[in-house]
Image (cartoon, helix red, strand yellow):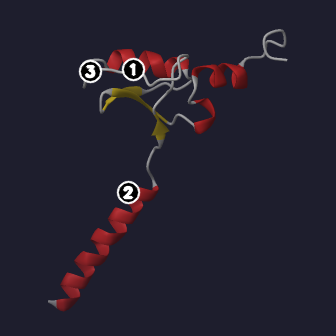
């Protein structure tokens, strides 16, 4: 019985560690006005997906009344940072 309990505990712990270390990551994007994009829970998932597209990420949704973008790196959180980092126009960004 003790072996069974230890085995179950080990499986649960390894599963919890695996789930926490393999998260997709993401960020709340920041607008031109240096504020987060607000939304209504689950009603604005399409809006948030469009916002995330502006930040170079293909998927996002409304979470805790703000848009959340999956796999949005810290480098591209701000609207203009994404364009500076990815735009090839030397006249705008020397």
Secondary structure found at label 2: helix
* Residue at 63% over, 35% down: 75
Secondary structure found at label 3: loop
Give the answer, above or below, for where 86 lies relative to 75.
above
The residue labelled by disc 3 is 40
| Circle 3 or circle 1, nearest the eye | 3
Q: Quadrant of the C terminus?
A: top right
Residue 86: x and y, percent?
Answer: 70, 22
Secondary structure found at label 1: helix
Residue 40 falls in image quadrant: top left
The residue labelled by disc 2 is 19
The 10 Å Cα crowd at callout 2, few under 14, some 14 to 19, many 20 or more, is few
* Residue at 53% over, 34% down: 72
Question: Toward the viewer: 85 or 9?
Answer: 85
| Circle 2 or circle 3, nearest the eye | 3
Q: Quadrant of the N terminus?
A: bottom left
The residue labelled by disc 1 is 48
How many marks overall? 3
Is 7 positioned to the left or the right of 88 in the image? left
What is the distance, in whole Å, between disc 3 and disc 1 at their CAs? Answer: 10 Å
């Amino acid at each position: 019985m003790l072996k069974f309990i230890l085995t179950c505990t080990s499986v649960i712990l390894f599963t919890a560690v695996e789930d926490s270390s393999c998260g997709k990551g993401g960020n709340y994007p920041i607008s031109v006005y240096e504020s987060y994009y607000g939304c209504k829970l689950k009603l604005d998932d399409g809006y948030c997906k469009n916002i995330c597209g502006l930040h170079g990420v293909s998927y996002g949704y409304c979470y805790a009344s703000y848009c959340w973008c999956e796999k949005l790196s810290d480098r591209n959180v701000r609207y203009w940072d994404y364009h500076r980092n990815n735009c090839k126009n030397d006249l705008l960004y020397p």
